[in-house]
Image (spheres, grey):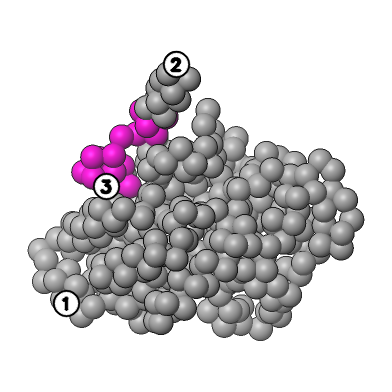
Amino acid sequence: MPTLEDKLRAGQRVITAELPAIDGGGVAEVGRQLAPMQDWLDAVNATDNTAAHAHASPLAVAIALKQCGVEPIMQLVCRDRNRLALQSEIVGAAMHGIENLLALTGDDVTAGDEPEARRVFDLDGPQLVALASTLAEGHYLSGRPLEPAPRLFVGAVENPGAPPIEYRVERALLKARAGARFFQLQIGYEPELLERFVAQAEDVGLTDRAALITSITILRSARALRFVDEKVPGVQVPAAIIERVEAAADQQQACFELALELAAHALSLPGVRGLHLISFRKDAGIAKLCTQLGLEPRIEREKSLAYAHDSALTH
């Protein structure tokens, strides 16, 4: 079965998603959360103490995702671990066949419900990308050999809507030079900012080095949009959008239509290679979104990739 890396290298459009935070229930709970969206997804993020709230570890959830037949993307944040712990997590994940890593600096502890927790931040996001690349080359940061070297496909995050845009593109390029091969971009509600980011990313050669995957969130109400606007750093929701949803007879449907518009716009940009979907609905919102966008289920897209590969071999 082709991996996320195989698909991106082949130029295929991909769909990833965020698994809701897991606090217990074992593999069965992971399977339950996956069920409404699994058929559409090329890979799923195992999050790492999102917004500085403690949950099941990303390594444990990533292993459970594999057991459910889904390719995991294991997130790692620098807030909670020093370089020794980060290296052991990555090498341990590779032992279980977990190759996709998403490197993040991490929200400050003041964003969570245990603000007295001690910050680590021994490394930051770009340095974590470089650390993973070092491990993939067959040695630890100390220079000690690591045999066999883990096979890793390293990603990072960037916010295409936070000014100055030029700085964001340059920072992403720095991460790509350190070894990031894909970016899951922060959610945004101002399409023109995404357009500017993608255009500048193409101009500086970032899209030749790494795949850009745009994040789309499916919310349920104007209140949720207002929360994003007020509480999520670096994300602004225009007042007109909040007012539009607030005035709708069915706010959940209005939020879905908004997500559909943003996703369609993102996919229309030549530098965007896929979508990263985050749903706060308890139904099959992701499946419905993919269907209305005209995207095929994962297995059908994989058949197309296999056919293209076989055709190339016969010519």
Name the N-terminal-most of marks 3 and 1. Answer: 1
Which residue corresponds to mark 1?
Answer: 240
Image coords of residue 49 (percent x, y)? 59, 65
- Cα separation, mark 1 vs mark 2, equals 54 Å
**Which residue is at a point 66% across and 47% down the rendered structure image?**
152
Pick the residue in front: 69 or 53: 69
The circle on residue 314 is 2
**Which residue is at a point 36% across and 54% down the rendered structure image?**
272
The answer to whether residue 151 shows anywhere in this view is yes
Image coords of residue 223 (percent x, y)? 27, 73
Amino acid at circle 1: Ala
In the orientation shown, which residue stands out farthest toward the right? 144
**Which residue is at a point 48% across and 20% down the rendered structure image?**
313
Q: Nearer the viewer, mark 2 or mark 3?
A: 2
Amino acid at circle 3: Leu
Label 1, residues with CA under 10 Å away: few <14, some 14-19, many ≥20: few
Pick the residue in front: 237 or 100: 100
SS for callout 1: helix
- The magenta segment: 286-302
Label 2, residues with CA under 10 Å away: few <14, some 14-19, many ≥20: few
Which residue corresponds to mark 3?
Answer: 289
The answer to whether residue 24 shows anywhere in this view is no
